[in-house]
Image (cartoon, rainbow, N blue to C red):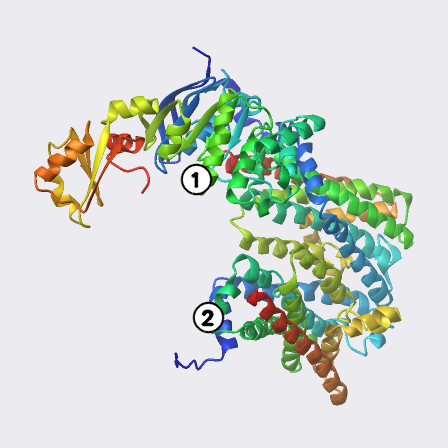
Amino acid sequence: MNTHRVTTPGPLRVLSWHLVAYKRFWKANVLSGLVQPLLYMLGLGVGVGALVDRNTGATEVLGGASYVAFVAPGLLVTTAMALGAGESMWPVMGGLKWSRGYHAIAATALTPRDIVLGHGVWMTVRTGLASSSVAAALALFPDTRSWGLIPSVLIAVWVGLAFAMPVMAFSIKAELDGAFAAIQRFVVIPLFLFGGAFYPLSQLPAAIAWLARVAPLWHGVVMARQCTTGTVQWGAAALHLGYIGLWVAAGTTLAAVRMRKRLST
Amino acid sequence: MSSNSLLLRIVPPVFAVRRPQRMIERHVVAYRRQWLIIVSGFFEPLFYLLSMRAGLGDLVGTVSVGGVQVPYDRFVAPALMASSAMNGAIFDSTGNVLGRLKYFRLYDAALATPMGPADVAMGEIGWALLRGQLYALSFLVVMWSMGLVGSPWVLMALPACALIGLTFAAVGFAGTTFMRGWQDMDIVTTATMPLFLFSATFFPASSYGSWSWVVQLSPLYHGVALVRAANSGVWTAGVIGHVAVLAGLSLAALALAARRLDVLLRK
Amino acid sequence: MSEALITARNLVKKFGELTAVAGIDVEVRRGEAFGFLGPNGAGKSSTMRMIGCVSPVTSGELRLFGMDPATDGPRIRGRIGVVPQMDTLDTELTVEENLHIYGRFFDIPRAECRRRTKELLAFAQLSERATSVVDNLSGGMKRRLSIARSLINNPELLLLDEPTTGLDPQARHVLWDRLYRLKQDGVTLVLTTHYMDEAEQLCDRLVVMDQGRIVAEGSPRSLIEQHSTREVLELRFPAGRNEEHGPQVEGLGERHEVLPDRILVYARDGEEALAAAHARGLQPESALVRRSSLEDVFLHLTGRTLVD
């Protein structure tokens, strides 16, 4: 029997596979990761903000914050959501169907579980990088500059995983990539718009507000906002984090089960 | 070289259009099984409108358009209509065209028949326009049912959206002929997002103060201005300028697109 | 003699500095099966694209049905069928939709498209797969569909660029059978290939191309008679030793060629040459006597093998 001992854990070796493939793209990614949130801040934050802030009743709805300060944490967390979900669609299907990279990995000593956890670690890196660059952009504006941006990045990563892992589970089973466009249009974009990033859920009809509370996004947005505005309530924070964690855990478990099935047939 | 073929080289190939409708016929057949993709395209601007109306409407209150105070949703709706005409046209004329041009080689197949490069280019742009008109019409119905229509002139928003669609489909198509591969698709997002955000879509150009002239550089701004004029029924001389900018840009882009396609496919 | 469908005089194709076709003269007559034989990069595909009116002629004269591709491209393309080297089938459409839409590109009325689609599916032995998506077809099926599609406009002239490259032997024979039927129906075939067996099977007449020029022309039989002997003796010596045995076979036949892996001796009677070799004390690892093929013609004309 081969007694050669591998010291690096499996998921990390899967991560290194992702990193090698990413080498060619990271520069363009970091640049657009900085520029896009800057543009959103200038457009929605400052532009729409000017409209909102001259409206006297608005600040009360926003909990005393200026509109820019209100929107900024939402921007941070939705960026991680969009990236986590998007990078768990076509790339996962590609690994199974087109480039078949996962099949190549599975042919080595690595297990399907390593592939799923490796994807999780990889998504942690990607969403971490992306939300850090959003945070860097936000630090440029006096209204949004805050130490709370640092924990907010961690919260954003957590939310990113809460989307990445369930979407991965979906992608492993998906047959046609047309389904991804549907997820983008009917899940990711509606959550971006109605998930509490641009205004409090209290503005929405009760039914839609409750739907928004089911998804992990809103919990992350609220927590990040508490961090940046310095109004953290620890008990509620634990609940929010725990709820997001449920999505991460359920998604990871389901993805691992499906990946094992998919690679063993 | 005969004088005849010399002439062919000088006259822009745009004018050599014979049967672009055949390309559209092909897309109708191809999308018969994927109609959901077509239908789902309608929802994105609708979601934006609903979100802006429900959430920001209260927060913003009213916005001044040409000295008249209008509710925020009525301010945003025409801009969303114009933006979705741009987004739809860009989407159809970049990613889809790149795939057909470089990866599925659909155009190579078409050019082995009596179809020419101009037929292909015009067919693709025509398809993007048709699809855009479908969305514009349904968006108009939604606006009307939500009470956001300000004037019967709003019907002029349809030709305005057609012009926006034509402009961006032609620009998108021309740009796509220069792309090396999928990796260049990122440029499309990077280019359209600022247009979407800074074309007096979500707030009036006057918010920029002395910098407000900059929005004139955005072709979408001229489209937004047209649709807004249609919805309010207030036409000013500026409309002629907006139309001229869009028409000029689309003609230039069309000529470039057909010429580039000729170079790429008829090596 | 029947009319000429294609005439090319001093036809040249350049891509910038690179000359792909360096002045060729070709005439293809109605009803013929005509082949361009040559290795990759010989200029076959560039010639085919010019004939297919999708690639402008750099200089020289090209006429199809008496018309100039530069001015009458669409009219000419309406009368020819093209099977490109790489399939350009529409992967978003089913098998029958591929035929139907392609017919519409030729402006054929819908009812007529439907009729021909049915007919061609039967011809290509694809009737059972009519509603399959193209992606799910095998390589041979895709190639047959490409040929069926090229026939949708009842072309007088069919251009086939490397029709069987990449197919397994069985799929190739099925395809050859279909092409042979077309030939019998009077369709003029022009094909490129780097397979000698394909050229010998299908072509009445062919030109051998090398580095953008035509180096020989004639029927497969006459080319072999003209440029080779009736038989060939192949001698294999241990790897790397073929070169040194070269001089020792001198005079066994009319001439010989030393290749890295074997020595070819051209002789009217191969067995006789083998006996003579043994008499000289040569002890090859293996010896084989066979009839001359177009491969030998090509080797003789260019000093290189066709497939490397």
Say if A16 sits above or below C227 in the image: below
The kind of secondary structure element at disc 2 is loop
Amino acid type, mark 2: Thr
Task: Find disc 1 in the rendering and name its residue.
Answer: C165
The answer to the question of whether label 2 and label 1 lie on touching residues, with beta carbons closer than 8 A, is no
Residue A145 at least partly seen: no
Between residue C149 and residue B5, name the one nearer to us: C149
Between residue C45 and residue C202, name the one nearer to us: C202
Q: Relative to residue C144, is residue C20 drawn left or right?
A: left
Between residue C156 and residue B254, name the one nearer to us: C156
**Farthest left residue in view:** C280
**At 92% across and 54% down in the image, what residue appears?**
B147
> Which chain's residue wears label 2?
A
Task: Find disc 2 in the rendering and name its residue.
Answer: A108
**At 78% across and 55% down in the image, what residue appears?**
B43
**At 73% across and 67% down in the image, what residue appears?**
A45
The quadrant of the picture occupied by the C terminus of chain A is bottom right
Query: What x and y, as percent, mark residue C113?
Result: 67, 29
Residue A226 circle label: none
**Farthest top residue in view:** C1
Residue C87 at least partly seen: yes
Say if A202 sits above or below C244 in the image: below
Residue C131 in which image quadrant: top right
The kind of secondary structure element at disc 1 is loop
CA neighbours of label 2 inside 10 A, class few (<14), some (14 to 19), many (20+): few
Amino acid type, mark 1: Thr
